[in-house]
């Protein structure tokens, strides 16, 4: 039995989308907090929230010890700011307790599984956030499953309808070869935003329609 055509799907999406936009590689802790800020909002809003947070509180020590309401005010444009401010401060407190310092660069010396275990044992950090840190800050072959990747791969029949986040992470990590995880993740996110939208996908213009199991829109 042959598996889903993951390389073909990537090839078609890349043809359609053009060159990948380069993304700066952040320090490990910065990427972790940036990923927390990216939840339930657009890239533009979360990047702005991160910028405003770092402008107002230039060190992670200041973020850790500031009144939570001030953190929430700084990141307001990123949505659910009160929850995110609490989550960020809990993560920083736990890192400070474990490391004695607010820095995670030592994780670069650990293997992928050790990094994933460490990150997912922090408060409120799940497999998607850990995979983003591995992939974007450390250049490791992780495959983050965000809402776009989850939706598109379900429509392609790679995931069963109703798969949990943990199941999606496990199934897709086994399915997508390490050498294409970075590019396929970005391609599926872009496809989910531009074409395969949640409510009204633009199926007539979809470059990977032939592999879709969703049926006529
Ligand atoms: S055919 Fe439609 S539902 Fe299927 S992947 Fe393309 S846009 Fe999404």
Image (tube, rainbow, N blue to C red):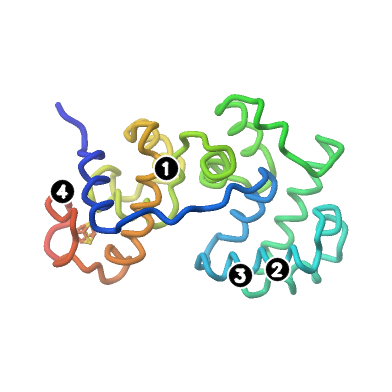
Q: Residue at x 72, y 62 (%)?
A: 85
Q: Nearer the viewer, mark 1 or mark 3?
A: 1
Q: Residue at x 58, y 65 (%)?
A: 46
Element class at badge 3: helix
Q: Position of residue 97 (x, y in %)?
A: 84, 39
- Residue 82 image label: 2
- Alpha-carbon distance for marks 4 and 1? 21 Å
Say whether mark 4 is within 8 Å of ligand 1.
yes
Counting residues from the N terminus, which is met first, the one under dot 4 or under dot 1? 1
Q: Position of residue 109 (x, y in %)?
A: 66, 26
Q: Is residue 118 above or below residue 196?
A: above
Counting residues from the N terminus, which is met first, the one under dot 1 or under dot 3? 3
Element class at badge 4: helix
Are the residues tagged 2 and 3 within 8 Å (C-beta)? no
Depth check: give the residue in front, 100 or 84: 100
Q: Is residue 178 left or right of residue 131?
A: left
Per the image, the residue denoted by label 3 is 78
Say whether mark 1 is within 8 Å of ligand 1.
no
How crowded pointer 2 is (Cα within 10 Å; few <14, some 14-19, many 20+) is rated as: some
Q: Nearer the viewer, mark 2 or mark 3?
A: 3
- Residue 182 image label: 1
Per the image, the residue denoted by label 4 is 211
Say whether mark 3 is within 8 Å of ligand 1.
no
Element class at badge 1: helix
Q: Is residue 119 left or right of residue 197?
A: right
């Amino acid at each position: 039995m042959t598996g889903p055509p993951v390389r073909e799907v990537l090839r078609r999406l890349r043809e359609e989308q053009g060159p990948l936009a380069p993304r700066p590689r952040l320090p490990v802790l910065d990427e972790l907090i940036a990923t927390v800020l990216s939840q339930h909002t657009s890239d533009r809003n979360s990047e702005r929230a991160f910028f405003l947070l770092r402008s107002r509180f230039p060190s992670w020590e200041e973020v850790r010890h500031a009144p939570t309401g001030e953190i929430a005010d700084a990141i307001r444009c990123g949505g659910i700011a009160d929850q995110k401010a609490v989550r960020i401060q809990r993560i920083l407190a736990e890192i400070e307790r474990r490391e004695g310092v607010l820095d995670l660069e030592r994780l670069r010396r650990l293997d992928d599984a050790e990094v994933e275990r460490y990150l997912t044992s922090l408060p409120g950090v799940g497999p998607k956030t850990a995979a983003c840190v591995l992939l974007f800050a450390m250049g490791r072959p992780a495959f983050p499953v965000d809402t776009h990747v989850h939706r598109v791969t379900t429509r392609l029949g790679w995931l069963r309808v109703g798969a949990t986040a943990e199941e999606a992470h496990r199934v897709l990590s086994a399915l997508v070869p390490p050498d294409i995880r970075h590019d396929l993740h970005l391609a599926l996110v872009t496809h989910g935003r531009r074409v395969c939208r949640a409510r009204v996908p633009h199926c007539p213009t979809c470059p990977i329609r032939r592999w879709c199991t969703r049926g006529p829109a």
